[in-house]
Image (cartoon, rainbow, N blue to C red):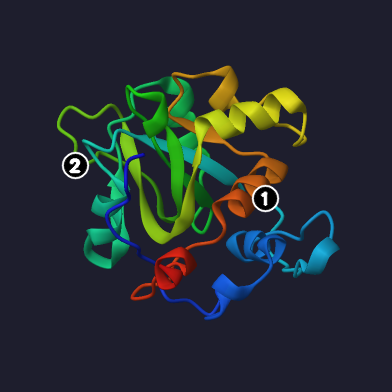
Amino acid sequence: MVGIPRAFSIPSAQFPANIRSLPAPAIAAALRPHRMPRKAARGATAATAPAASKYWLLKTEPGEWSWSDQAGAPGGIGPWDGVRNHQAMNYLRAMRRGDRCLFYHSGAGAASRRVVGVVEVAREWYEGGEVEATAGGAVDVRAVGEFQRPVGLGEIKKAAAAGEVEGMKDFALIRQARLSVMPVPVEVWDWVCEMGGGFVQDGEVGEHEAEG
């Protein structure tokens, strides 16, 4: 399994310092502060926000732009450009500042295809980008945090096949394998965040590291 080079998060009042000690559902709620959760079960905390806020998934080849590149950028902010597929570009245009995105490492090997962290939109669509010959424009995204454990594509497909998560079977990550930008249903977002176990705060170590 490919290792993630370093942990990173942007300090924010939206994320409690003891997030690693919260129950998994509460971690998922903390990672999506822009909506009221459908259920307040098992200790999940409610949070109000504009109903128009959405969740997305962004794919990237780790050899071109990895989580460590995103986290290591000044302020954790970098442009998401070079997208040429019209449907993916339209999704980028639809993003609003503060929207949250799953950061997904794609790759040739099945083991490398996995969600590794969360970013948020820091700047909405603008024309141009830093990638030469980019088609159209870009959005800027800011690193929020690296998951305690990556959530692999195999796990997502397994959950979809088992019907464990509402909306998972129609999730574009499964239905449209070549699409690099896509919306994420809120139920899928919650499940991925729960499976990822929250994220490691800057300067901390995961529980498994501390115990080892």
Q: Residue at x 82, y 54 (%)?
A: 38
Q: In this rendering, is residue 2 above or below 30?
A: above
Q: Can residue 148 be seen at all in this image of the molecule?
A: yes
Q: How many marks?
A: 2
Q: Residue furthest left?
A: 132
Question: Which image quadrant: the C terminus?
Answer: bottom left
Q: Circle 2 — which element?
A: loop
In this rendering, does residue 169 appear at all?
Answer: no
Whether residue 134 is situated above or below residue 50 in the rendered picture: above
Instruction: Name the amino acid, label 1.
Output: Asp
Label disc, if present, on residue 130 of the rendered structure: 2
Q: Quadrant of the N terminus?
A: top left
Where does residue 99 sit, x and y in percent of width and height? 54, 53
The amino acid pointed to by label 2 is Glu
Q: Nearer the viewer, residue 75 or 64?
A: 64
Q: Which residue is mark 1?
A: 190
Q: CA distance from mark 1 to mark 2?
A: 32 Å
Q: Residue furthest front?
A: 212
Q: Is residue 9 left or right of residue 19?
A: left
Residue 15: image location, x then y, percent: 55, 74
Residue at screen point 64% across, 59% down = 28
